[in-house]
Image (tube, grey):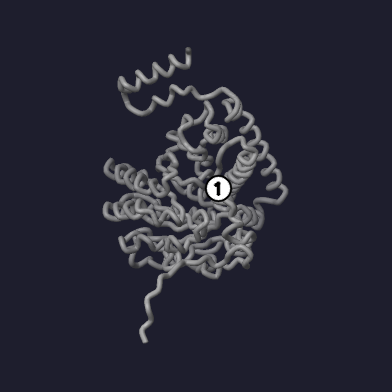
Amino acid sequence: MAKKSRLHIPRPSARPGDKPDFSYLNLSAAGAVDRPPIDSRTRDIEYLSSDLVRVLNDDHTAKGPWDPNIDPGELQVALRWMLLSRVFDKRMWQIQRQGRISFYIEALGEEAVSVGQAMALRPGDMCFPSYRNQGLYMYRGVKLVDMMCQCLSNTGDMCKGRQLPIMYHSNKANVFSISGNLGTQYPHAVGWAMASAIKGEDHIAASWVGDGATAEADFHHAITFAAIYQAPVILNIVNNQWAISTFQGFAGGERRPFAARGLGLGIPGIRVDGNDLLAIYATTQWAADRARRGGGPTMIELVTYRGGAHSTSDDPSKYRPKDEWAAFPLGDPIERLKQHLITEGHWSDEKHEELEEELTAEVLAAWKEAQQYGTMTEGPFLDPATMFDDIYAETPAHLESQRRRMIEVEGS
């Protein structure tokens, strides 16, 4: 007797009160995945989209063909940026809970994604981030004070009070504005990359979305254009297992890895350990070299875990086990890099504690400075007349008239 069709509803492997279960993750041993030439055909490297590129072994040594052999001094710098991102996040989360900023999103557990990929890109490459890429901004030179001012919407706010907190940008650092409309950064990145190719430049674009945003229409529009025109772009999918309160299976992660999303269009995909800075650096460098040499786009799925809440408006204990992050098989990215450096004789627990104290002091000093530009309750405050700026190249008469009337009313 034939079975009747049934509607399939994806379900997470564990709910609050359950024991964490990550048996659904397909893990490869460190060093087990081959590194193909960058001119390989997509059909010949499909295994990269289903296996998991890993370099750091459980004994904290580097293994396999993807080992980038980064200088220990550079790895110490990378560790510093990752730890700074976490210390910054912790402080800003506390500040929001004190009611001193209105909203915040932290990158807890995902620090290696931003720092590892930033290291592999060139300064001229354009980045189109999502809202957990704090380390990317920091690595590219955006000051902590400037990021804090943006969250305060004060007179030092790079967005002039027009954006939700954490939606930074930096023209100087080649980092595009974060968008609250998830997925829109993908078409922007592909369009920028196409323009770079038309101009004959060797700059590439890189963009980041979460697993949930792969269900957005913008995602599919972007990868279609990227594939057809062979745009020099890296399309990153940060699979942190949860899209707000929705398990990644609802975005299609049950059937095939997100790295395989572009295979039907001819876009190679790489599935990488998103908590392994060495593997992230190596795969990003591979994709960047491929793009610069005319190989077109590459899709990278970074398998990681959102260690904290989605945002300050979220309570993850309502939809997942409280101890799920501690049970995540790929561990903590900062602890893994720290232990690797210690194992190789280039770091110590004492140095790590000293660095954390130094960075904590640096963040506190930045917060003290940021408040001098105003807070939500204390001046100085942004001039309301600036709302008429940056809209048109030449401000039309009706807006100039409105500006004058507003100033007159304020002055009366």
Q: Residue furthest top?
A: 412
Instruction: Depth check: give the residue in front, 154 or 34.
Output: 154
Q: Tell me how many marks there are.
A: 1
Q: Secondary structure at mark 1?
A: loop
Instruction: Depth check: give the residue in front, 343 or 260.
Output: 260
Residue at image point 52% right, 41% down: 139
Q: Please identify the quarter of the rendering in which residue 38 is found.
A: bottom left
Residue 225 picture location, percent across and down: 29, 52
Instruction: Depth check: give the residue in front, 35 or 322.
Output: 322
Residue on which disc 1 sits: 311
Residue 43 picture location, percent across and down: 33, 66
Tell me the quadrant of the picture where the N terminus can be found.
bottom left
Residue at image point 61% right, 35% down: 100
Q: Is 117 displayed left or right of 356 in the figure?
A: left
Q: Residue furthest bottom?
A: 1
Circle 1 residues within 10 Å: few <14, some 14–19, many ≥20 = some
Instruction: Depth check: give the residue in front, 76 or 20.
Output: 20
Q: Is 190 displayed left or right of 149 in the figure?
A: left
Residue 8 seen in this snapshot? yes
Residue at image point 52% right, 56% down: 245
Residue at image point 30% right, 60% down: 265
Q: Amino acid at mark 1?
A: Ser
As drawn, 68 above or below 378: below
